[in-house]
């Protein structure tokens, strides 16, 4: 008995699904949309992809070049200061050795004169 009821209900659902439904849509406009703008916005000339790409490339290259230049300039300054400090330290060491040798020579000359 249930088998006889089931197909009839399926047929009723399939008929309801195949019937076209009427959709109604109303179009409304607001008063703001109907008004024409009093002052037209000036149109800007669009920047082309090639011109924009070239401008971006040149700007990026210039920025990277300037950053690299200042980085290298700073590294050069730091290394130059370190080298100058090393030269002064070497000069002080040579001066100490020179003064030590002169005192030794004077002592040797004094001993030779005693003999």
Image: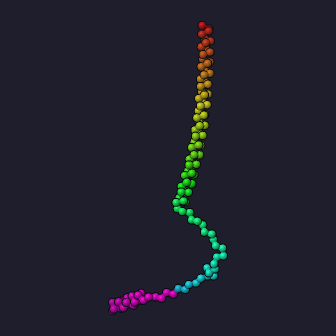
x, y (%) of residue 52? 55, 60
Name the image quarter holding the N terminus: bottom left
Give the percent coordinates (x, y) of residue 42.
Answer: 63, 69
* Residue 95 in the image: above or below residue 30: above
From the top left corner, tell me how far across and down residue 43 is, in percent.
Answer: 60, 69
Q: Which residues are magenta?
A: 1-24
Locate residue 80: give its quadrant: top right
Give the dominant element type of the magenta stretch: helix, strand or loop: helix
Question: In the rendering, at what x and y percent does residue 64 appear?
Answer: 55, 50
| Residue 91 higher or lower than 26, as above or below | above
Give yes or no for residue 10 being in the magenta stretch. yes
At 57% from the left edge and 51% from the top edge, which residue is drawn? 62
Q: Quadrant of the C terminus?
A: top right
Name above or below for residue 62 compared with residue 75.
below
Observer-nearest of 47 and 115: 47
Q: Is residue 98 visible?
A: yes
Which residue lies at the image location 62% right of the left edge and 8% below the top edge? 114
């Amino acid at each position: 008995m249930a088998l006889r009821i089931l197909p009839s209900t399926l047929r009723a659902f399939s008929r309801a699904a195949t019937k076209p439904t009427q959709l109604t849509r109303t179009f409304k406009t607001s008063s703001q949309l109907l008004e024409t703008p009093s002052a037209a916005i000036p149109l800007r000339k669009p920047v082309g992809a090639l011109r924009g790409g070239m401008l971006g490339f040149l700007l990026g290259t210039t920025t990277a070049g300037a950053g690299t230049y200042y980085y290298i300039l700073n590294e050069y300054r730091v290394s130059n200061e370190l080298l100058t400090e090393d030269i002064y330290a070497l000069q002080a060491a040579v001066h100490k050795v020179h003064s030590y040798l002169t005192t030794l020579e004077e002592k040797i000359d004094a001993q030779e004169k005693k003999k």
